[in-house]
Image: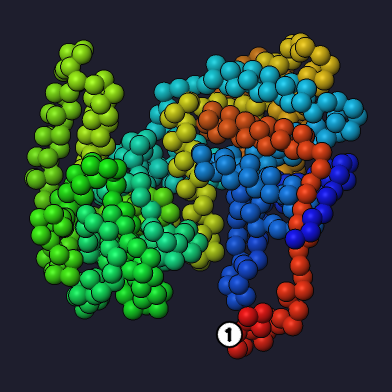
Amino acid sequence: MSKQIIYNPEARQRIMHGMNTVARAASVTLGSAGPAVLIQHRTDGIAPIFTRDGVTVANAIIQEDRIADLGGRMLRDVAGSVSRQVGDGTTTAIVLARIIASECLKSVAAGFHPLELKKGLDLALTLVEQHLHRQAVTGVTADWIEKIAAVATKSEPGVGQLLARALAELGADGTLSFQLGSALQDQLDIVEGIHFGQGYLSPYFVTDKTRNEAVLDHPYILLYDREITDLMNLVPILEQVADQNRPLLIIAENVHDQALTGLLLNHIRGVFNVVAIKPPGFGDKRLNRLNDLALLTGGQALHEGRGDQLERVTLAQLGQARRAVITAEQTTIIGGIGDQARIRQLSRSLRQQAEAIRAQKPGQGSATGNRHDIDELEERIAMLAGKVGHFQVGGITDVEIKERLVRIENAYMSAKAALEEGVLPGGGVGLYNCLPAIAEVIAENAEQQQGIAIMRQALAAPLQQLLANSGLSGETVLARLDAESDRRQAFDIQHQRYGHFLEIGIIDPVKVTRLALRNAVSVITTLMATESVVMEIPDLSIMDGYSPEWAAATREDPRM
């Protein structure tokens, strides 16, 4: 396929145009006063997406100019990375990346060397991160979590209390799943659950396209320690499960192509609802995890070595649970029917084994092996004793519920981030207060000094964008904050008042703020070093004679 090469300055100009397009649409969602964005669904007849989430807006924008779309993709990557790490702060990251990119490209056009600018930005980033850690307020309380949730959800009433309760009962390492509720009010249900890092074997198992999850209600659970190669071996148990009108979760060493294809075809056609995953653990430890799952779900782990045959499995040998939620990377099983007394007994036994290893004197056994054994035991104990929370998001319409679900899930991740690194003044003030940390820095040369100057402009950008979204005078607010001797003062845009950030509830987690800035700098410094873009020229002749209307009516593709 032939290639198209675009050189600077045209390449950078078109990339920057794409960034501006995405940032202009997404940045309006920043802050509690920020308006929402309405996104047309790609399928006709389905309600549009109503969102106040920056990464959702960015992901929805695909530009016709492919070079400009590269710029938009950079912002999507920045926001997506922050979203995956901490949930909140996606729009802040977009705003930061846009201003840094804009100022860097101006500087490069003026003759500054990109690599020297990068050194200046990296130096400023290091100093800002150190300042953020020094200014962090740790020892996060339930009251702070409520206020953090209020900021992240744009002042949703009652959400903060539920999230604070979830974190109190589950802990920072606990699992809280979110789903669309059927009531007007939000509901939090915390139950005993099993959580481990194995996802579905094929994305075609997905039942919830919006969240890319496979959800099974009241499933039977088949536990098998070997690979499944022949679908016919599964047919007897599949028929028994289908007669009960319930789904089946298969946990096996692997499901080979032929058997997996058969499962997927029947699953897609609605013959039966089934999902296949691998068990947790690795190597010789995997058998222990399979036995643990059997104990937790009230089933029996099938071992071919002791004569268990897949084609002779009965319903009595299967585990059961109230619900299973499987994503591409992890599985959560809620409400297993295992014997709690036996589970507690096994947990005590595992703890005793772990304590015995810890009590060994130096030189007894391999240090690396001992550490590995302790880690394995602790992971099994956590799975046996774990709790899982279930947050049902309420609302009047599906559009409203889906929009709230994203914000509430982001708020939960933001609260967990606050527990890790502490909090600081929110509403863009935390970054704005970092300006003195780099005000007096003298770099090695003028080009690096220009990179530090660009960082100074970026630190003020989120606060300025927040004020612009609320229609307030930025100069007045910035002057008042500059006049404050207490660096923990913040500005409540919604109620237009100043005060200590903990008292007025304008709180941001340090980790969210730090990662938003770090990801923005990382992506944009890559852009600066770009001198040309190589793109494939698409062959449009393959679409000759293609009519979407005709293809939809006949279910055929004329290109075939």
Q: Is residue 184 visible?
A: no
Residue 509 percent coordinates (x, y): 52, 31
Question: In screen coordinates, is 334 left or right of 435?
Answer: left
Q: Nearer the viewer, residue 154 or 260?
A: 260
Count how many numbered circles sit on residues in the image.
Answer: 1
Q: Residue at x 76, y 67 (%)?
A: 539
User: Mark 1, residues whose alpha carbon is within 10 Å: few (<14), some, or many (≥20)?
Assistant: few
Residue 97 location, quadrant:
top right
Q: Which residue is mark 1?
A: 555
Q: Nearer the viewer, residue 107 or 393?
A: 107
The N terminus sits in image quarter? bottom right
The C terminus sits in image quarter? bottom right
Residue 211 percent coordinates (x, y): 47, 58
Residue 179 percent coordinates (x, y): 41, 57
Residue 26 percent coordinates (x, y): 69, 49
Question: In screen coordinates, is 266 left or right of 135?
Answer: left
Looking at the image, the residue that sits furthest to the bottom is 554
Question: In screen coordinates, is 246 left or right of 138?
Answer: left
Residue 368 location, quadrant:
top left
Question: In screen coordinates, is 295 left or right of 416?
Answer: left
Q: Residue at x 58, y 29 (%)?
A: 514
Q: Is residue 366 above or below residue 310?
A: above
Q: Residue at x 22, y 34 (%)?
A: 377
- Helix, strand, or loop for circle 1? loop
Q: Residue at x 83, y 35 (%)?
A: 105
Query: Which amino acid type corresponds to the residue marked 1 in the rendered image?
Result: Arg
Q: Is residue 215 visible?
A: yes
Q: Nearer the viewer, residue 205 or 180?
A: 205
